[in-house]
Image (tube, rainbow, N blue to C red):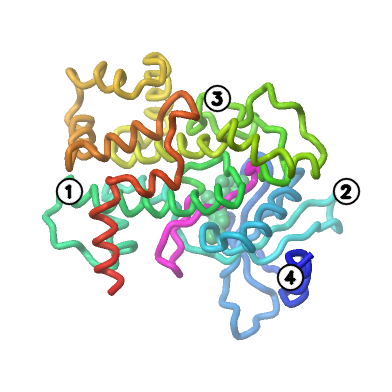
Amino acid sequence: FDMFFLAFVERLFRPTFKKDDFVLGKKLGEGAFGVVYRVSLAKKSSSNKEGDLVLKKATEYGAVEIWMNERVRRACASSCADFVYGFLESSSKKGGEYWLIWRFEGESTLADLMQSKEFPYNVETMILGEVQDLPKGIERENRIIQTIMRQILFCLDSLHSTGIVHRDIKPQNIIFSEGSRTFKIIDLGAAADLRVGINYIPKEFLLDPRYAAPEQYIMSTQTPSAPSAPVATALSPVLWQMNLPDRFDIYSTGLIFLQMAFPSLRTDSSLIQFNRQLKRCDYDLVAWRRSLEPRASPDLRRGFELLDLDGGIGWELLTSMVRYKPRQRTSAKAALAHPYFDREGLLALSFMQ
Ligand code: ADP
Ligand code: MG
């Protein structure tokens, strides 16, 4: 009861909006299920700068996405883009579309930043505050990549602890928040909340094949189709334990780690080729490495060298994330406690003081 009451009161004091309140700006993205714009409020009040909001006009999955964003705001707000409001806009089209509003977090996604030749140095001052006093080289790159990985895993851990699996983790869905100077997760359009059975049936066609784990279906195909909500609530912690659906996101995050370590794997075509190679190696990264290393390009060799720093803890973490069986993959929480992050943690502490 308390939770519902609080949610109701919170809702009451939050601003509500309608279609005419927004002035459309630049288009930021267009997918199969919606279009995203930078927008500003028509009536310029003092607190609203131009274009400081983001609007997604979504089709059939908009209702679920609003639900997920409301839940995230209450349970783990700092992990995702700051959600403002969502509503059904029914005046223009028959059937209507869902409008979702967020704060504009910043100009760049991790995908944008990774496209730069400068990566990861172009992120260094953004997340570490100042340039480290280390010569340019793999050690310094590794520290920046550690910080990015820690921030993504932190967001994932809180999403997973809330009972939400994102299912579309990729650099395009990780935004750099200029306000908090950290990376945050966006786009809950394919997410599933297993604790209450929302979007329980896996929509495999929503999954991005470039970053999807091999199991495709997040829940075992043995799992019966969506039970009614109360049944799902009673069952889902058990199902969660049995199927470990959160490990789907871990696999995708492992691929991001891989792309950060190996510049040559950052393009779509090279990632697709990597996926084919890994499949041929029965999803065994160690076998993939063995098959490549003898005739590896300087770029690949450099990536292995980076992951091999400090006794190979980076490589160890990577191989614990990218595994065929979900059960054998690490969780977000366990990954955060991995020795790979030890030194980085100390650095972050000294930066905060
Ligand atoms: P899609 O369903 O089209 O993938 P997303 O939610 O991923 O929709 O948004 C598309 C793009 O819009 C993102 O890749 C990002 O560039 C931008 N974007 C989305 N939300 C925000 C936000 N809160 N702040 C800044 N940019 C955003
Ligand atoms: Mg997206």
State if disc 3 and disc 2 touch (CB < 8 Å).
Answer: no
Residue positioned most to the left: 135
Name the amino acid, label 1: Glu
Where residue 229 sits, quadrant-wise, is top right
Mark nearer the N terminus (1 vs 3):
1
Residues in magenta, as a range: 174-192
- Which of these two is toward me, 258 or 115? 258
Mark nearer the N terminus (2 vs 3):
2
Where residue 220 sits, quadrant-wise, is top right
Label 4 belongs to which residue?
6
Q: CA distance from mark 1 to mark 3?
A: 34 Å
Name the amino acid, label 3: Glu
Q: CA distance from mark 2 to mark 1?
A: 57 Å
Tell me the mark number nearer the camera, choosing from 1 and 4: 4
Q: Residue at x 20, y 21 (%)?
A: 293
Tag 2's secondary structure? loop
Label 3 belongs to which residue?
215
Q: CA distance from mark 1 to mark 4?
A: 48 Å
Q: Residue at x 21, y 64 (%)?
A: 131
**Residue 161 appears in the picture as rendered:** yes
Tell me the mark number nearer the camera, choosing from 3 and 4: 4
